[in-house]
Image (spheres, rainbow, N blue to C red):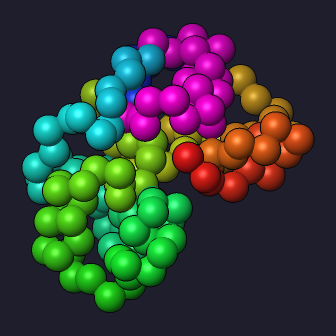
């Protein structure tokens, strides 16, 4: 059954565009939310993070993480939350919400089992983003 999906994204990310397209192909209504401009608080972010380890909360390709200025493995939940609220580019994306149910990241198998997707295994799209058009959706690595 089609769902209304709140899709928290970094505008302009090509992989987010493909992910939203898959959701729409499955009949879902996608409500796009700018992850960078959304007013986050600890409770709303934790609803997506649930029992995930702190390192999973972070976009591994955020500039500060990539450069080593921020090491998510060395942060406790309070420190991590402070950084994520202050600088949302650090948040792993996309974040998805359907009603009261939430998901961190976009794994096609998980999303398919959760709300349904119209994809075959060779067309699976990960949460990563790529500027390399020669890669298949399944092989993408995040750069945006």
| Viewer-closest of 69 and 58 | 69
Relative to 96, residue 144 above or below: below
Indicate left or right for 144 with 43 as reference. Answer: right
Is residue 19 inside the magenta stretch? Answer: yes
Q: Is residue 136 visible?
A: no
Q: Is residue 120 visible?
A: yes
Q: Position of residue 140 (x, y in %)?
A: 74, 50
Q: Which of the 4 image quadrants contains residue 74?
A: bottom left
| Viewer-closest of 143 and 92 | 143
> Which residue corresponds to the image point at 32% horizontal and 26% vertical from the top-left?
33
Indicate left or right for 72 with 82 as reference. Answer: right
> Which residue corresponds to the image point at 71% horizontal and 23% vertical from the top-left?
118
> Which residue corresponds to the image point at 32% horizontal and 67% vertical from the top-left?
51
**Residue interval drawn in magenta:** 8-29
Indicate left or right for 43 with 51 as reference. Answer: left
Q: Position of residue 100 (x, y in %)?
A: 25, 35
- Please, which residue is most extreme toward the bottom here? 74
Relative to 67, residue 23 above or below: above
Q: Which of the 4 image quadrants contains residue 7?
A: top left
Q: Position of residue 88 (x, y in %)?
A: 28, 50
Report the label total.
Answer: 0
Relative to 61, residue 2 above or below: above
Q: Which of the 4 image quadrants contains residue 132?
A: top right
Is residue 48 inside the magenta stretch? Answer: no
């Amino acid at each position: 059954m089609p769902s209304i999906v709140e899709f928290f994204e970094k505008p302009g990310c090509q992989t987010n565009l493909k992910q939203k397209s898959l959701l729409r192909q499955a009949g879902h209504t996608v409500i796009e939310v700018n992850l960078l401009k959304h007013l986050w608080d600890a409770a709303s972010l934790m609803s997506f993070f649930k029992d995930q380890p702190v390192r999973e909360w972070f976009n591994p390709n955020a500039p500060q993480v990539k450069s080593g200025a921020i090491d998510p493995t060395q942060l406790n939940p309070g420190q991590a939350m402070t950084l994520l609220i202050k600088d949302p580019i650090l948040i792993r994306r996309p974040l998805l919400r359907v009603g009261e149910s939430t998901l961190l990241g976009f794994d096609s198998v998980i999303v398919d089992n959760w709300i349904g997707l119209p994809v075959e295994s060779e067309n699976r799209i990960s949460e990563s983003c790529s500027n390399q058009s020669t890669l298949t959706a399944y092989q993408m690595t995040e750069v945006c």
